[in-house]
Amino acid sequence: MAREIRIEEQAQVPLDGAVFGWLAMVPIWLLALTVCLQGEMQGLALRGLVLWSAGIVMFLAGVRRGLSFRTPGGPRVGQLAAMLGMFGAGLLALILPETVGLMLLALCYAIYAVLDPRAARRQEVPLYFIRLRPWQMGSACLALGAAWLALVQ
């Protein structure tokens, strides 16, 4: 049995994509700000920042895997490699020293900011990722980088 699936989508970011995409970033910003303030809660905020950020990186790896099932012609090797790499990086960030984990996670978000728009052009992810991902993932990179700087100074 076979079936053909036709998807029509717009380049504009849909409301649910914007709301859920940006809501996921709010804990990153708040926890990074708490780390930067260097108060009593810094250690707890740092652990929360690593946990939440790694969780989102691994969630996005799962999203990419799920979307690969709908790629015209089936999943591609690059999609599978990216999914495994990002999931593994998220796990690794959980066991590394937290300052190193922050930098690894910032790198993961930077990779998503660059690769997701390219994947959208190849029909591997929604077209609106071209507009959403650079800003969304870039904001996470800035927050993680700020937290890292507050820790190493």
Image (spheres, rainbow, N blue to C red):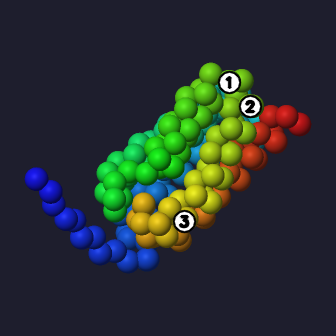
Mark identifier at residue 100: 2
Q: Looking at the picture, how far across and down is residue 153, in whole percent?
A: 89, 37
Residue at position x 38%, y 51% in the image = 75
Which residue is denoted by mark 3 in the rendering?
A: 117
The residue pinned by badge 1 equals 96
Lower position in the chain sequence, tag 3 or tag 2: 2
Q: CA distance from mark 1 to mark 3?
A: 29 Å
Q: Quadrant of residue 7?
A: bottom left
Q: Amino acid at mark 2?
A: Val
For the residues bearing labels 3 and 2, Cβ distance under 8 angstroms: no
The Cα atoms of the two marked residues, 2 and 1, are separated by: 6 Å
| Distance between the alpha carbons at the discs numbered 3 and 2 | 27 Å
At horizontal 85% and vertical 34% (from top left) the residue drawn is 152
Would you place residue 80 above or below residue 10 in this image?
Answer: above
Q: Are marks 2 and 1 in contact (CB under 8 Å)?
A: yes
Residue 61 showing in the rendered view: no
In the image shown, does 47 or 4 lie closer to the viewer?
4
Q: Nearer the viewer, mark 3 or mark 2?
A: 3
Q: Is residue 86 left or right of residue 39?
A: left
Asked which quadrant contains residue 2, the reply is: bottom left
Amino acid residing under circle 1? Leu
